[in-house]
Image (tube, rainbow, N blue to C red):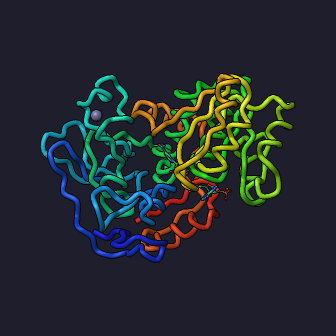
Amino acid sequence: MKAAFFKEHGGAEKILYDDYRDPAPEAGEVVVRVRACALNQVDMLLLDGRFPPPEGLPHVNGCEVTGMLEAVGPGVTGLERGARVILFPGLSCGRCEYCLVGQRTVCVRYGYLGAHKDGGYAELIKAPAANVLPLPETITFESGAAVPLAMLTSWHALIAQAGCRPGQTVLVQAAGSGVGSAAIQIARLCGARVITTVGSDDKIDFAKSLGADHVVNYRHQDFVEETKRWTGKRGVDIVIEHIGGDTFERSVYALTRLGTLVTIGSHDTHWGRLDLRHVYSKNLKVLGTNLGSILELRTILDHVVEGRLKPVVDRVFPLRDTRAAVQHVLDRKNKGKVVVVP
Ligand SMILES: NC(=O)c1ccc[n+]([C@@H]2O[C@H](COP(=O)([O-])OP(=O)(O)OC[C@H]3O[C@@H](n4cnc5c(N)ncnc54)[C@H](OP(=O)(O)O)[C@@H]3O)[C@@H](O)[C@H]2O)c1
Ligand SMILES: [Zn+2]
């Protein structure tokens, strides 16, 4: 098959488009013919070596995949060749104490398709049969690819972790990101009001079109002061944070008493200082979150079918132009998700 892969760490120039080993399904696995795969910031960390692929190089990135079932391995039943499918990206053992209590996203052997295994920047991908869900007819392959990591993570962060409720206020960092563009919509679906940040003015109208009530360009305005002003000095109930460093540190100051900050990622730096005085004196919660469950993914797909949530596809590139797609994300130009199609 053809795939876009890398043999060395670096920037977009390290992505090669060439022949790559065909995946063969083993017991309990399927092979899917990829029709669309979305890019994520974690792909950039894998590429530049800040999060080197656990199975080594060469490696094929790509965690968010839709396609058609191509082949099934021994013991797989109930899945038809040619079916339209979407892949749940989380890998877990099903046997450790965390899997046994139903918390598979913190499995001691946890992994992601596209990180711990080769991913979807390819014509074919191998995955556990248990990770396959039908892709509803009304969702295009490209739109579907914008859902299983970015939207699912934001859903789990807001609904399961932060318990977002009608009437609350939410600060979503980076409206243009996959995670941010999903979080704005989900917070609105919960009946919350949303303030969000952007790094360039051309993302302001985009953020408003997703339902953001107030947009702050943090290059000209202080997002903490703007959040305080927007909430009448009170602060927000929830912050969805996924940048790390100063953004994490300052996000805590945007919270009101009893507020919750959910940290999803750290692509600026893996470190962030925490002003403990604010945490204990205001009874704040600082929670981590990782992906979500396959059941939550099914629920999100229902919302997409009903038109209550909209996967946000910024640009679609041919797989052979993955290098340009990666550069587009590295340049922080994306408004929502960037997708490659074989
Ligand atoms: N825990 C999980 O399960 C999980 C799942 C998915 C994603 N994540 C994490 O969530 C974060 C967002 O991922 P994504 O794929 O949604 O991102 P993305 O679509 O690539 O967007 C990232 C955006 O963040 C903003 N940004 C602010 N500071 C930045 C910096 N120092 N470097 C680069 N971008 C910066 C940029 O927008 P502006 O220029 O407009 O500020 C950029 O466009 C990542 O940290 C990712 O690893 C975690
Ligand atoms: Zn486990």
Q: Position of residue 295 (x, y in %)?
A: 41, 30
Q: Which of the 4 quarters of the picture holds residue 9? A: bottom left
Q: Position of residue 326 (x, y in %)?
A: 51, 67
Instruction: Out of 230 and 205, give the one closest to the viewer.
Output: 230
Q: Which of the 4 quarters of the picture holds residue 277? A: top right
Can see residue 33?
no
197 lies left or right of 120: right
Q: Position of residue 291 (x, y in %)?
A: 45, 39
Instruction: Out of 92 and 262, give the one closest to the viewer.
Output: 262
232 lies left or right of 271: right
Residue beneath the point at 66% across and 50% down? 246
Q: Position of residue 332 (x, y in %)?
A: 62, 63
Residue beneath the point at 36% across and 69% down? 5
Instruction: Out of 16 and 111, give the one closest to the viewer.
Output: 111
Residue projecting furthest to the front: 277
Residue 333's place in the image compared with 297, above or below, is below
2 lies left or right of 11: left
Instruction: Out of 148 and 252, give the one closest to the viewer.
Output: 252
Residue beneath the point at 38% across and 69% down? 4
How many numbered tags mark residues here?
Answer: 0
Q: Which of the 4 quarters of the picture holds residue 99? A: top left
Residue 114's place in the image compared with 189, above or below, is below
Residue projecting furthest to the left: 74
Residue beneath the point at 60% across and 38% down? 309
Quadrant location of the N terminus in the rendered image: bottom left
Can see residue 171?
yes
Quadrant location of the C terminus in the rendered image: bottom left
